[in-house]
Image: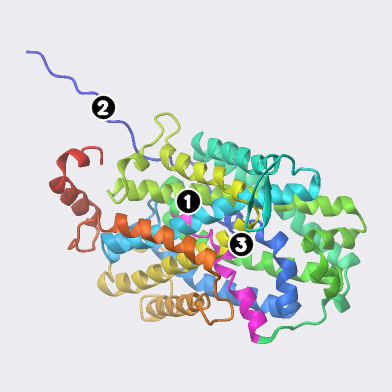
Amino acid sequence: MRLSQTAPAPDTSLLKVLGNWDALALGFGAMIGFGWVVLTGGWIASAGTMGAVLAMVTGGVIMGVVGLTYAELTAAMPKAGGEHNFLLRGMGPRWSFIGSWAITGGYITIVAFEAVALPRTAQYLFPDLSQIPLWEVAGYQVHLTWALVGALAAVVITGINILGVKLAGTAQTFVVIFLLVIGLMLVFGSFTGGSASNMEPFFTGGINGYFAVLVVVPFLFVGFDVIPQSAEEVNIPARQIGKLVVVAVILATIWYVMTVLTTSSAMPASDIAQADIATADAMGALFGSDVMAKILIAGGIAGILTSWNSLLLGASRLMYSMARSGMLPAWFGRVHPKYRTPVNALLFIGALSFLAPFFGVSMLVWLVDSGAPSIVIAYILVSIVFVILRRREPHMDRPLRVGGKGNGGTFIGIAAAVLCIALLSLYLPGMPAALTPPPWILFGLWWVLGAVLLFRIPSGIAPGQDAEHRLLERLRERSPDAARSL
């Protein structure tokens, strides 16, 4: 009798190769992007030295409370996709899609932002970078040579991520170490060449100035949640993964406070307000050397690369997880046969970041503003599902339980949701930090596409541990041919 032979199914799992430092470097590096280089001068001008510090500490507390909910949920469900899995279990497929789509949109806007920020920073080092004019976008002339710097970097970073998460993690580690060295140099320079009198005025702009700084918090702190996205590839205990989420938020808060204090100590507020890139000029002033200013810019480029690398990894894992659940086309769930990375999701996001520099510097502000509300929406949903699972599944295996077994944990979840709702309200018309029309247009386009995909997901599937299985079964019943690839 001849037995039929069937080719083995391709392995679609991810490799478990990241360690403690790899995961922490991904989370911390994602948060310490480029904002600290170009935005610090604006923070000081808007709110004063201590006003900006107060806003950063407030933001750190908000993100720290949210991070506690992530820490517990990540330790309980250490699977690629983070929010996707939390919401699937606690609120069902459609809410899972909404939360996943929100954070994916936030990640992609920042990845595209970094692709624009890189040539913007490189021009500080190479003033003649802009050659061969192409077109104008919102009053800014885009040049081919300038745009190609960001576009080619998109190709390189996407390629590194396709070649394996371990390579991406190792590259991240080295760049984060370089960033930390830059930070120590800033602190040393502030103590030796800075002046407390330069920090005055400590407060300016009143409550509006404070909110103008606070509103960028989602953009500055997004990234700690990359650790949950990569949880399936981290080879450490689940409890430790959760702890790293909170540690990353604390480190980022310290970094931003340090940046404000050292920059303001270097020069009078009037000089900071006129500086092109205040942090770089501050570094030069502290050491009395233009070379040191250029080294700071190199640190800014390092920040761009760490944030870009981390958030590309996080967004691709989210799209992979959504495709694995049938929420996105199966194409996004394809894993590279050799490197076991979500190759198609990486290529898709890489293509968007390749195109972004060709829209010019105006895209910097638009991308930051358009992605921030989506990020906060995801944080609100995670905070709510944290409370739901505490009440519905009190005996769920939680290797890391925040706030104890009583009502302490529930209080943390409610506090996180309330704080994030308050943060979201700052973007609305009439508020001190209301968004301008272009970011709302980008935000709306992302959610129109999301709405189309959302209504492809069957309704009536209850949340729970097997929600993903039931969703896939329903999709197979609806369209057997289309579901074969799921």
| Residue 215 highlighted magenta (yes or no) | yes
Other residues around mark 1 within 10 Å, as few (<14) / some (14–19) / many (≥20): many
Which image quarter holds the C terminus? top left
Frontmost residue, 430 versus 315: 430
Select label 2 or label 1 by which is in front.
1
* Real-space Cα separation, disc 1 to disc 3, in angstroms: 22 Å
Compared with residue 348, is residue 407 higher up or lower down, i.e. above or below?
below
Q: Amino acid at mark 3?
A: Val
Whether residue 216 is visible, yes or no, is yes
Percent of width and height locating residue 385: 34, 69
CA neighbours of label 2 inside 10 A, class few (<14), some (14 to 19), many (20+): few
Q: Position of residue 162 (x, y in %)?
A: 49, 36
Q: Give the residue displayed 31% in from the left and 44% down from the top.
A: 329
Picture quadrant of residue 71: bottom left
Kindly identify which residue carries mark 1: 314
When the figure is inspected, residue 124 is found, relative to residue 265, above or below; the finding is above
Along the line of sight, which residue is nearer the eye, 325 or 329? 329
Mark 2 vs mark 3: in front:
3
| Residues shaded magenta | 207-228
Is 411 in the magenta?
Answer: no
From the viewer's perspective, is 292 left or right of 85?
Answer: right
Cα gap from disc 2 to disc 1, whole angstroms: 29 Å
Give the numbered dot on residue 8.
2
Q: What colour scheme has been applied to the protein in the rendered image?
A: rainbow
Q: Secondary structure at mark 2?
A: loop
> Would you say the residues marked 2 and 3 are in contact, meaning their CB atoms lie under 8 Å apart?
no
- Residue 447: x and y in percent read 39, 61
